[in-house]
Amino acid sequence: MTQLITRDEALMLKLWQRELALKERALKPVDPQYCIVWEDPEELDAAIRVTTPSPQWLAMAIHGNVLPPVSIYPLPVDSKGAVLPGHKLHDDVIPAMTEKQAMEYLLQKDVPRSVWEGTNTNRRRFVICKRSMVPVDRFYRNAWSLAA
Amino acid sequence: MSKIVTDTFEYKSAGETVDATYLVHGTAKAWGQVTISGGTSTQNDSVNCSSITDDGAGQYKFSFSNNIVNSSFGYNCMNGTSSNHARLQISPNVAFFSVGTLNDTHTLSDDAEVSGQVWGNLA
């Protein structure tokens, strides 16, 4: 893959500036092959959720030198939920990832911690799978559940 | 990356001006367009969206790549079918916003297309 942004340049930019720079430099979006299918232990009666990366974000993850280390999430917030100064969103970037690594990153960023870090149960709360494995018929969408 | 530092922009022909603050604070900070067909939702194009989560029939969550600084942001959401209408589903959050699409009987139901835009300040 052609290097469209170097680590040194990326560290001078904020995260959103990196995304816009790469969009301007015609970074080609990557159609995701995988999705995360998960259930929320806080809402057991809710429908199963399916998280799919955006093609633009996935392209940035695979390119490298754009995204911060996943350990910075969640950002620190105050009692009203506003982001506190001193967050590390723009401070560092990580190298290129494979698509599977990007899915593990996304799991930790966009899926609640209680889903992937739960230690109170041996029940599986999520699966990273090919998008083609998800049922196509949405008629009973709200009845989908993870197989035991 | 070069930078323009100014207080006001002026349109040369008409002499109309706009303060730079309007551009900084008035530009959409995130947007995404999703089509719902088959098993998973597909985000066709976006800015500042890391993922789309299909939360059930007619419920979609857009996660930000770059968080918004607080949840007091403006938003707009639309759907692609005239008989359905879109609304913001739950309280906005610095990490995501959710959109729901309702049918004529005000029941959450899938639509072929959903888009959302957010105006606010970036973290």
Image (cartoon, rainbow, N blue to C red):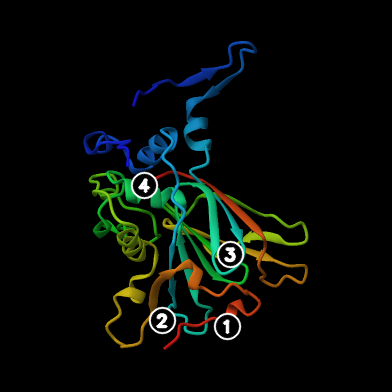
Give the mark, 2 or 1, whose residue is nearer the N terminus. 2
| Location of mark 2 (residue) | A41
Position in image of residue B73 (x %, y %): 51, 50
Q: Dot 2 surroundings within 10 Å: few (below 14), some, or many (20 or more)?
A: few
| Mark 3 in CB contact with mark 1 (< 8 angstroms) | no
| Location of mark 1 (residue) | A143
Position in image of residue A55 (x %, y %): 46, 51
Q: Dot 4 surroundings within 10 Å: few (below 14), some, or many (20 or more)?
A: many
Give the mark, 2 or 4, whose residue is nearer the N terminus. 2
Left or right: B41, with B50 as reference point: right
Q: Quadrant of residue A114?
A: bottom left
**Front residue (pair A132, A16):** A132
Q: Dot 3 surroundings within 10 Å: few (below 14), some, or many (20 or more)?
A: some
Please, what secondary structure does the residue beneath circle 4 have? Answer: helix
| Location of mark 4 (residue) | A60
| Location of mark 3 (residue) | B89
Please, what secondary structure does the residue beneath circle 2 have? Answer: loop
| Mark 2 in CB contact with mark 1 (< 8 angstroms) | no
Report the amino acid beneath label 1. Ala
